[in-house]
């Protein structure tokens, strides 16, 4: 089985199967055609450091649950107010809004339970994973980025602020994915910190790419609307080059990680 | 310093102090006149098993953060739609609704970070605390209870269903408070499970008391509206007696825990 197939299978095992609305809404959110980039990065990072990626499977699924919860809450009417995601009605459109809030809450809580019950990891590793995930996903990370984002509609948005939003909203969870691999492989903390930096750049590049691919985003200040199309493309190219350069210094050139990034950035075709 | 004073001081240290809306909203929610029953129960349970309650301080504050997040989300317009709590405007009334959602998300995430970084506990204890908290607060516990609650307005509410809602919504977090004390004190798992049972009864009693004290609750099916006033009072008295009986079998009669329950149930005056 490929890493992706393992992730899909394990998510099905971990997802609640009850007939109640909360269980159904959690499953609806989890199986909505996501590319599973973050859990694949966890497994690829573990592989990079010579560890069987299956050991990273449960923590990988936990990060996917955190990512999924953030999408469910971001789509709420009081946030981005999106009726559709990946061509399907959003959770609060299929179920009631209160259930969408609780679905996010339950997925976030479940992520920590899954890490704490992962097989094959030491208690010390579990505690480190939980510290990293909570720090990256919480008020100084992903949630903090979303807060700045929803409040920034009233502000003059500078390039610096956009960078900060992208880094927190997107970069921090990418960081935690790569850091998870390092922790599971017992890599030194200096390596973990280097991966964190790569994760930030990855979040930045991912957000520019997203802006470039989503031309309707005109009503919102983004790096694209601030820099313009050509400068954004150039900035994206430079950031990707830097990421690949940094990855090359890791064991075996971090080929497993690069192959996931190739999927994201269609390297050699669209961007490079 | 009393346990309560220690809790207040530690919560002030742990709460974010930034000038941004998310930090301010988190602090606003945390310092709203709560009685800190759950963290006091954590410390009292640790004391019952002969452990310095200061060792339980951080996990105790983590449970208070989980309780606080649940109130912020429960008050949202799409849930119970409450404009006031303890005489103050609710978080979504002072800040915008999106910030209220994120405030809950950040408090929940922070709770797990705090446990994972608690001083004086082994990694094994931290992992057990996190497993218990996530299980009690998540889809099979508190969040699941809230989901049944908001969906039950369309249902014929039986005594059994009300009991289930009370047990999950309120009992599970009380359970985790008592269980935390047992885990921190290295008590055997059989003791932890016995405390879990007591927590369930406590949640049930607490909810009946809440119904009896809040006569305006007429539009909602509660144990009070199903059983009537006299039978509810009798049921409450019997449940409290059973809780105290169970507690008496614990070391030193669980006096520290009983003294917290005395505060809740005004024992000897109102109820007994």
Image: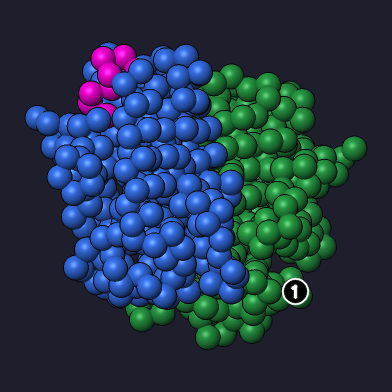
Chain colours: A blue, B green
Residue A174, image x, y percentages: 39, 40
Residue drawn 51% across the image and 18% down it: A190
Q: Which quarter of the image is occupied by the C terminus of chain B?
A: bottom right
Residue drawn 82% across the image and 40% down it: B6
Q: Quadrant of residue B27?
A: bottom right
Q: Is residue A3 located in the magenta-colored stretch of the structure?
A: no
Q: How many numbered marks does the figure carry?
A: 1
Q: Is residue A59 visible?
A: no
Name the foreground residue: B87 vs A32: A32
Single out the residue that lies furthest toward the left. A1
In this picture, is A239 found above or below A142? Answer: above
Q: Quadrant of residue A19?
A: bottom left
Circle 1 crowding by C-alpha within 10 Å: few under 14, some 14–19, many from 20: few
The residue that disc 1 covers is: B88
Extent of the magenta region: A250-257
Q: Secondary structure at mark 1?
A: strand
Name the side, left or right, on which B220 lies relative to A199. Answer: right
In this picture, is B84 found above or below A167? Answer: below
Name the foreground residue: A33 vs A197: A197
Name the foreground residue: A95 vs A187: A187
Residue A100, image x, y percentages: 38, 66
Name the side, left or right, on which B121 lies relative to B57. Answer: left
In this picture, is A118 found above or below A52? Answer: below
Q: Main secondary structure of the magenta part?
A: helix
Residue drawn 90% across the image and 37% down it: B1
Q: Which chain letter matches label 1?
A: B
Q: Is residue B67 visible?
A: yes
Residue B154, image x, y percentages: 36, 81
Residue A130, image x, y percentages: 48, 33
Name the side, left or right, on which A93 lies relative to B127. Answer: left
Residue drawn 20% across the image and 32% down it: A259
Single out the residue that lies furthest toward the right. B1
């Amino acid at each position: 089985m490929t890493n992706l197939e393992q992730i899909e299978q394990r998510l099905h095992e971990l997802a609640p199967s009850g007939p109640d609305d909360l269980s159904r809404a959690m499953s609806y959110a989890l199986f909505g055609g996501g590319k599973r980039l973050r859990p694949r990065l966890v497994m690829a990072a573990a592989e990079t450091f010579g560890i069987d990626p299956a050991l990273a499977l449960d923590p990988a699924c936990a990060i996917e649950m955190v990512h999924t919860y953030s999408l469910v809450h971001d789509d709420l009417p009081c946030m981005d107010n999106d009726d559709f995601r990946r061509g399907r009605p959003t959770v609060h459109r299929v179920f009631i809004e209160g259930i969408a809030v609780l679905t996010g809450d339950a997925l976030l809580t479940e992520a920590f339970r899954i890490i704490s019950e992962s097989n094959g990891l030491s208690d010390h590793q579990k505690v480190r994973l939980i510290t990293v995930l909570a720090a990256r996903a919480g008020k100084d990370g992903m949630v903090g980025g979303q807060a700045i984002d929803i409040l920034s509609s009233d502000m003059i948005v500078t390039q610096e602020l956009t960078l900060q939003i992208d880094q927190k909203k997107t970069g921090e969870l990418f960081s935690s994915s790569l850091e998870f691999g390092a922790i599971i492989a017992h890599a030194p903390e200096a390596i973990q910190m280097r991966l964190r930096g790569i994760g930030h750049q990855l979040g930045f590049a991912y957000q520019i790419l997203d802006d470039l691919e989503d031309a309707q985003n005109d009503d919102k200040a983004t790096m694209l609307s601030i820099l313009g199309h050509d400068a954004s493309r150039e900035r994206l190219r430079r950031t990707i080059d830097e990421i690949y350069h940094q990855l090359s210094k890791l064991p075996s050139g971090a080929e497993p990680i690069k192959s996931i990034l190739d999927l994201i950035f269609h390297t050699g075709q669209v961007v490079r």
